[in-house]
Image (cartoon, helix red, strand yellow):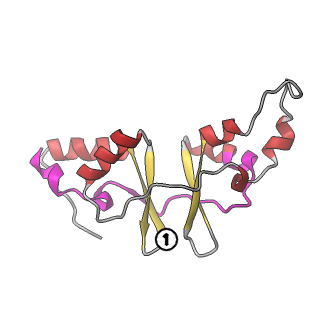
């Protein structure tokens, strides 16, 4: 299990993740969630720089039940862009960050995943499942692959 101490985010992350642009509709992102079983997806600008993250919870927050709208206008809401609902204050990690710190950050923040950002660009995503997989590998004696 001591091998886990040498693991970095780059040893566990999913590289080259699916990303979307700010003009992606909620219907399109919901289809992505369904197709890939993602909980969230990074939103990037034209250069691949992170500008936000949209999660399933963000999409759910787009629906409002008020006295005036007992049934939300589903079609109208699903045509909205992710820029209207995405989280802009995003916590990230770097590829070379120790996986032990990332694990603790997941616990402390209760985030399911973090975008991995290097030199201003999204290069990966590390999720709870990735950390659990790395823990299993370390427990089996598999050494970290080393920094990218």
Q: Secondary structure at mark 1?
A: strand
Residue 27 drawn in magenta? yes
Q: Which quadrant would the N terminus be assigned to in this image?
A: top left
Q: Position of residue 31 (x, y in %)?
A: 68, 44
Which region of the structure is painted magenta?
A: 1-29
Q: Using a 10 Å C-alpha cutoff, classify the residue at mark 1 as few (fewer than 14 neighbours), some (14 to 19) or many (20 or more).
A: some
Q: Which residue is mark 1?
A: 121
From the viewer's side, name the closer residue of 72 and 108: 108
Q: Position of residue 11 (x, y in %)?
A: 28, 58
> Would residue 142 be seen by someone viewing this image from the given angle?
no
Residue 134 drawn in magenta? no
Residue depicted at 21% across the width and 56% down the height: 7
Q: Which image quarter: residue 12?
A: bottom left
> Would residue 52 be seen by someone viewing this image from the given angle?
yes
Q: Farthest residue in the front direction?
A: 67
Residue depicted at 26% across the width and 47% down the height: 134
Q: Is residue 120 above or below residue 53?
A: below
Q: Position of residue 147 (x, y in %)?
A: 25, 68
Residue depicted at 30% across the width and 46% down the height: 103
Q: Position of residue 69 (x, y in %)?
A: 87, 28
Q: Is residue 144 above or below residue 65?
A: below
For residue 4, side relative to residue 27 (left or right):
left
């Amino acid at each position: 299990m001591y091998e886990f101490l040498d693991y970095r985010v780059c040893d566990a992350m999913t590289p080259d993740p699916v990303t979307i642009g700010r003009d992606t509709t909620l219907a399109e992102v919901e289809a992505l969630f369904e197709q890939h079983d993602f909980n969230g997806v990074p939103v990037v600008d034209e250069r691949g720089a992170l500008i936000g993250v949209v999660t399933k919870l963000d999409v759910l927050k787009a629906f409002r039940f008020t006295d005036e709208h007992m049934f939300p206008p589903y079609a109208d809401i699903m045509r909205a862009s992710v820029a209207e609902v995405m989280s802009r204050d995003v916590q990230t990690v770097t590829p070379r960050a120790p996986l032990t710190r990332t694990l603790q950050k997941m616990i402390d923040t209760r985030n399911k995943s973090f975008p991995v950002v290097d030199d201003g660009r999204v290069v990966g995503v590390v999720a709870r499942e990735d950390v659990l997989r790395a823990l299993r590998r370390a427990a089996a004696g598999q050494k970290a692959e080393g920094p990218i």
